Image (cartoon, rainbow, N blue to C red):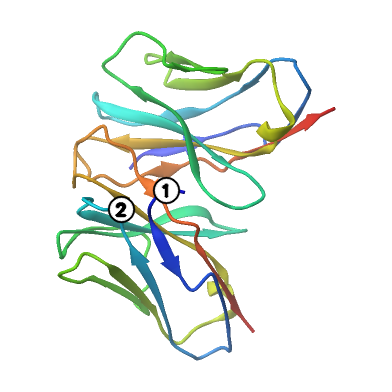
Amino acid sequence: DSGVTQTPKHLITATGQRVTLRCSPRSGDLSVYWYQQSLDQGLQFLIQYYNGEERAKGNILERFSAQQFPDLHSELNLSSLELGDSALYFCASSVAAQGSPYEQYFGPGTRLTVT
Amino acid sequence: AQTVTQSQPEMSVQEAETVTLSCTYDTSESNYYLFWYKQPPSRQMILVIRQEAYKQQNATENRFSVNFQKAAKSFSLKISDSQLGDTAMYFCAFKGRNAGNMLTFGGGTRLMVKP
């Protein structure tokens, strides 16, 4: 158990819909990262938040957005869903924002299926 | 931008034998960190081993060790005395010190340990 929690574990929804994935980082970690794992794109970094502020953006679609709340949990919002958005979405957390050797601890992931 | 390449999509090894997984990367940074993550069928991402680029000594963690060749930008993982529980996808990952804290992953190597 990494200490990072993600809900829900599985999500099945239809094209065009909007979903919210939730992540709670390990106690004491200020940084939260979102990654997408799909069959065709592999593991890709989406976005990072540090202590409530956006710190880095990767290959995140405009239909996707995220935020980190004062209690440090984070939510990833996916809208106008397409079949190609079906993937495993991971949240990870770490102590620092940048330049540190500390590893990222991954949550169990949320499996999103768009039908 | 950093890229990470794992040239072996699939590998197999007999139980108790040794196997080496390859990883190469490309970066213009001089200070960075390299990781190997394991993803068993449960899909959980588990850190196996970490190497800091400024350290010349290769990292070891029990049966897992790396061969880090900075000039060649190579970072291979050696698993000794392979066990059935080592069956998993293995991802090589890069983290720079200057470009945020996100991980850039390779495409993965699927390792099957045979009894």
Chain at tag 1 = A
Which of the 4 image quarters holds residue A64? bottom left
Is residue A54 in view from this perspective? yes
Which chain's residue wears label 2?
A
Q: Residue at x 43, y 37 (%)?
A: B93
Name which of mark 2 and mark 1 comes first in the sequence. 1
Q: Are marks 2 and 1 in contact (CB under 8 Å)?
A: yes
Q: Measure the alpha-carbon separation of dots 2 and 1.
A: 8 Å
**Category of crowding for the residue at label 1, using alpha-carbon neighbours closer than 10 angstroms: few (below 14), some (14–19), many (at least 20):** some
Mark 1 is on which residue type? Ser
Helix or strand or loop: what does disc 2 sit on?
loop
Vertical position of residue A97 compared to residue A99: above or below: below
On residue B4, the disc is none
Instruction: Name the image quarter holding the C terminus of chain B.
Output: top right
Q: Residue B108's x, y, as percent?
A: 59, 40
Which amino acid is tagged 2?
Answer: Arg
Residue B56 falls left or right of residue B105: left
Q: Residue at x 19, y 37 (%)?
A: A99
Q: Position of residue A29 (x, y in %)?
A: 23, 51
- The residue that mark 1 highlights is A2
Against A115, residue B9 (above or below) is: above
Left or right of residue A87: residue A90:
left
Query: Where A70 sits versus B23, above or below?
Result: below
Label 2 belongs to which residue? A26
Classify 10 Å Cα crowding around label 2: few (below 14), some (14-19), many (20 and above). many
Q: Are marks 2 and 1 on the same chain?
A: yes
